[in-house]
Amino acid sequence: MKPSDFDFDLPERLIATRPARPRSSARLLVARGDRIEDRHVFDLPDILRPGDRLVLNDTRVIPARLSGLRRRMGEGGATEAKVEATLLDPTPEGHWRALLRPLKKVRDGEIIHFSDDLSAEVLGRSDGTATLAFNLTGDDFDAALSKAGNMPLPPYIEAKRKADAQDREDYQTIWARRTGAVAAPTASLHFDPPLMEALAARGVETTHVTLHVGAGTFLPVKVDDVRDHKMHAEWGEITEAAARQINETRKKGGRIIPVGTTALRLIESAARDDGTLAPWLGETDIFITPGFRFRIADALMTNFHLPKSTLMMLVAALMGRDRIMDIYAHAIAENYRFFSYGDSSILFPKG
């Protein structure tokens, strides 16, 4: 398989830069086997069955974009340089791996000042990233980051506009709880309280899991053979209670429907060969491509993805490559909005 096998032409006008309002008014493409329906997210209670279970990622996005100053004393006196930082993921030592732009403006051991309260020492640089040791930890760090940082919008939105105050609400799910993501589980952005109430009334159940989405979710596939691509690792947790709920639903004949590729990747990472789910704590770098055998997920709710991306390969694994290309052709012809703030789909491999 080549990345070009998952390519398509997307008109730029279909790239969404703001979400639908209210959230659940976004359009929803429903694909069941070889059939397609054009619906809205608020129709989910009619689309799902009593006893179905939605798996929701409760990660919370941090305001990971920071603007700072590097100060340096030289022969001609003090100099300053602006440095932009995007936090990628925490290290086991409690530091942060980050992208710095421009990286050449800093040296190991220097301090970058992001606000009166927040600064970080550059511990080292490698592979285009830097390791930062912040002056604050715990709740103090979270509070300072909340004031100094901006939401880390995807590159295809940042190219059109900068993040603003509205994104702090828009780019966060209503059930976000566990801090650590630098990208949102975007299919979940379509849910609002009225929809959750309607789903509960329908008898659709929910389970929360955690996968801290990393910036690697936006990395392109640069290899000629898809099998040579190395996925970024992301930290996740499935509690014993969550695994038990999902296993009980499967035993009763209910369908397991992850909301978003992050939830799907996590539960398939923890799947046993017998089709049951095990508790999970740790990192996963699972790479799902056509030929993958799904053990837990019966369907998937997901937004529309970038051409030639690992997420296009994942949905092709679920639906079949030719079928998913037909689905995307339909979405483009019907002017669905694409990517993080765009419309959504729910994909049932079987009719």
Image (cartoon, rainbow, N blue to C red):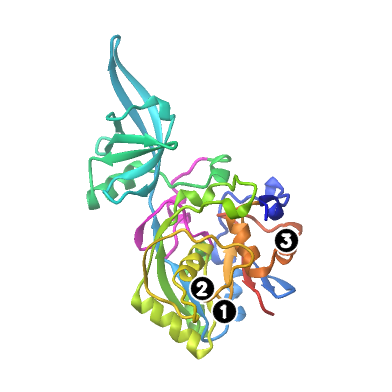
Q: Of the residues shown, which amino acid type is indicated by label 3?
A: Met
Span highlighted in magenta in the image: 162-187
**Vertical placement of residue 183 versus 222, above or below:** below
Q: Main secondary structure of the magenta part?
A: loop
Does any portion of residue 71 appear in the rendered image? yes
Q: Which residue is mark 1?
A: 45
Q: Which residue is mark 3?
A: 325
Q: Where does residue 268 sit, x and y in percent of width and height?
A: 49, 70
Compute the Cα span from label 3 to label 1. Answer: 27 Å
Asked if disc 2 and disc 1 are in contact, CB closer than 8 Å, the reply is yes
* Residue at 30%, 34% in the rendered image: 122
Q: Is residue 183 magenta?
A: yes
Question: Quadrant where the C terminus lies?
Answer: bottom right
Q: Secondary structure at mark 1?
A: helix
Of the numbered discs 2 and 1, the one sitting upstream in the chain is: 1
Tag shown at residue 195: 2
Question: Quadrant where the N terminus lies?
Answer: bottom right
Crowding around mark 2 (Cα neighbors within 10 Å: few <14, some 14 to 19, many 20+) is some
Does any portion of residue 26 appear in the rendered image? no
Q: Of the residues shown, which amino acid type is indicated by label 2?
A: Leu
* Residue at 48%, 55% in the rendered image: 170
Compute the Cα span from label 2 to label 1. Answer: 8 Å
Asked if disc 3 and disc 1 are in contact, CB closer than 8 Å, the reply is no
Compute the Cα span from label 2 to label 3. Answer: 29 Å
Q: Nearer the viewer, residue 56 or 268?
A: 268
Q: Nearer the viewer, residue 117 or 135?
A: 135
Q: Of the residues shown, which amino acid type is indicated by label 1?
A: Pro
Closer mark to the observer between disc 3 and disc 1? 3
Tag shown at residue 129: none
